[in-house]
Image: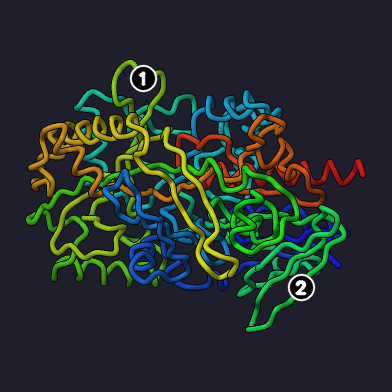
């Protein structure tokens, strides 16, 4: 019998498993559908390029056809490995704007304002620059500057400054706005995922049991209380029971799916899928949103120093493999998305509404398509999309992918911000620092507003940050669309909490791993406090 059953070994699940098992009297089980994180492609920072191609350690989900994307189905990869998406992402460490968290609190979630959450960001972090007012120096999650940033990444920052934007050496400090090189979640030339930071050092604890290859099929309930989990492992259906709580950490796509498979969700949808209703909670799966993103790609055939598929490029990668295997140094310590920034698409914006990621390689179709030769790419994403979608069921089979509808570009303002961002990046890349690298934008023919809109609808997609589908809020409103309260307890249920990015009332203006880690650090404290109060 366990005190806590944690479903999902991603960023939040690993944090909770480590923090809760610090008390030797508390027995914790962590269930992860995927394998361990021992693969070199996971541990090597540049291994993400091959992970994208092979789909290793990932759920390779797809959206339903998106009207805003000209009917295309978007790609929705999520981590399926210990560490979750923190084991397969680009390791960029950014937190968001203070106003993001103050908005959470203003929506009826006391304790989630920026002043409340900053201590948890700091507690999680071990920044190689040392501790200060904004950063931690001795936390489990190692954050550092890139070992060997590419000259083109540095040139991109210089070009943005030439275009009139401010340089910023710390996007998580006094201000977010500006351009610079990203800090990354790495340690000694290896990825520092949530599993590496929180879980691996404590696998020997006798009160912590980790189940890999364990796919949860439903949460067991009794009288509207979570009492256990049912899961499939090695071809067998198994169960675990808890005398405490079930903590759902399966992410913004699979946490609502699992709630619905367990009979918790909108009654009409459950009935349509042949599932008996345990608790009518119509907000489950609603309010899904994500950072819609487009990639501007420049082919620079003569810039052989850029990453690329050519005899020269392959030889450089081979040397990089040698260096990384020898002493965890060299080319393959790159996270690829090395530089970027947070910018306003127009001067009257109160806060940056765009994020850029610069990649010193040509990138197409999430890295799954080969573009021969050399070049570079710039991601442009909308930080606060207005579009809202949903996650629904595709039947009662727990192995079936969820019905994912982010409603990308459903709101006109998202298109307008993305279009302004695309033009802004063109201005940056035309500056002397980037012009020196030469090259030709692959989409250069799209010039008018209509041509740009057509281009964006044909190429935009996710930048891998789905949130909001189990929204945190006080509940009791007319639509009952909040799923968890400010202590992350599922409304109307006992012994059940959701702890992952799905609870975010609104997406953070940044990559989401850091905020998810913070959220789980805070949840661990709440769980201890609530247990102490009985």
The dot on residue 250 is none
Against 1, is 508 above or below? above
Q: Is residue 181 left or right of residue 491?
A: left
Q: CA distance from mark 2 to mark 1?
A: 52 Å
63 left or right of 138 in image: left
Outermost residue, top direction? 348
Who's the residue at 57% across and 26% down the image? 103
What residue lies at 16% left-to-right and 32% top-to-bottom?
A: 449
Q: Quadrant of the N terminus?
A: bottom right
In the image, residue 508 sits, relative to residue 325, either above or below, namely above
Front residue of this view, candidates 457 and 125: 457
Q: Residues within 10 Å of mark 2 (few under 14, many from 20)?
A: some
Label of residue 349 in the image: 1
- For disc 1, the neighbor class at 10 Å (few under 14, some 14 to 19, many from 20) is few
- Which residue, given by chain and number where applicable, does mark 2 sit on? 239
The C terminus lies in quadrant? top right
Query: Looking at this rendering, what residue extends furthest in the right direction?
Result: 534
Secondary element at tag 1? loop
Residue 455 visible to the viewer: yes
């Amino acid at each position: 019998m366990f005190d806590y059953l944690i479903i999902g070994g991603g960023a939040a699940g690993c944090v909770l498993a480590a923090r809760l098992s610090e008390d030797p009297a508390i027995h914790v089980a962590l269930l992860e559908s995927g394998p361990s994180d021992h693969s070199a492609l996971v541990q090597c920072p540049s291994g993400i390029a091959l992970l994208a191609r092979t789909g290793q350690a990932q759920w390779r989900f797809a959206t339903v056809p998106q009207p805003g994307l000209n009917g295309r189905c978007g790609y929705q990869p999520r981590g399926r490995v210990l560490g979750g998406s923190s084991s397969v992402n680009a390791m960029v460490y950014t937190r968001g704007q203070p106003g993001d968290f103050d908005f959470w609190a203003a929506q009826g979630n006391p304790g989630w304002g920026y002043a409340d959450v900053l201590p948890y960001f700091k507690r999680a972090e071990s920044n190689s620059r040392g501790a200060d007012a904004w950063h931690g120096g001795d936390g489990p999650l190692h954050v550092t500057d890139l070992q060997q940033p590419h000259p083109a990444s540095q040139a991109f920052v210089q070009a943005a400054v030439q275009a009139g934007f401010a340089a910023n050496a710390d996007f998580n400090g006094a201000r977010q706005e500006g351009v610079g090189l990203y800090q990354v979640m790495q340690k000694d030339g290896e990825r520092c995922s949530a599993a590496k930071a929180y879980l691996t050092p404590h696998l020997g604890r006798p009160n912590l049991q980790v189940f890999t290859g364990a796919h949860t099929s439903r949460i067991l309930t009794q009288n509207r209380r979570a009492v256990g989990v049912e899961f499939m492992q090695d071809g067998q259906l198994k169960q675990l029971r808890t005398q405490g709580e079930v903590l759902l950490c399966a992410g913004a796509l699979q946490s609502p799916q699992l709630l619905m498979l367990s009979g918790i969700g909108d009654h009409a949808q459950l009935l349509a899928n042949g599932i008996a209703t345990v608790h009518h909670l119509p907000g489950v799966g609603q309010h899904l949103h994500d950072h819609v993103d487009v990639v501007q790609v420049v082919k620079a055939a003569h810039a052989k120093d850029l990453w690329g598929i050519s005899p020269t490029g392959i030889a450089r990668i081979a040397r990089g493999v040698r260096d990384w295997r020898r002493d965890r140094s060299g080319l393959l310590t790159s996270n690829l998305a090395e530089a970027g920034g947070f910018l306003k698409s127009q001067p009257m914006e109160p806060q940056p509404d765009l994020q850029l990621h610069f990649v010193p390689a040509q990138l197409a179709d999430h890295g799954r398509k080969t573009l021969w030769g050399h070049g570079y790419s710039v991601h442009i994403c909308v930080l606060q999309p207005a579009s809202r979608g949903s996650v629904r069921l595709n039947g009662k089979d727990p192995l079936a992918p969820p019905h994912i509808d982010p409603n990308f570009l459903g709101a006109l303002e998202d298109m307008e911000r993305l279009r302004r961002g695309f033009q802004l990046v063109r201005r940056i890349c035309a500056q002397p620092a980037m012009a020196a690298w030469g090259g030709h934008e692959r989409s250069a023919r799209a010039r008018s507003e209509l041509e740009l809109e057509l281009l964006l609808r044909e190429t935009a997609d996710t930048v891998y940050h789905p949130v909001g589908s189990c929204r945190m809020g006080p509940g009791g409103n007319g639509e009952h669309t909040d799923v968890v309260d400010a202590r992350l307890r599922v409304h109307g249920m006992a012994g059940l909490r959701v702890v992952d990015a799905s609870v975010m009332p609104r997406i953070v203006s940044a990559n989401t791993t850091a905020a998810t880690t913070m959220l789980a650090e805070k949840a661990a404290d709440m769980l201890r406090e609530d247990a102490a109060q009985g």
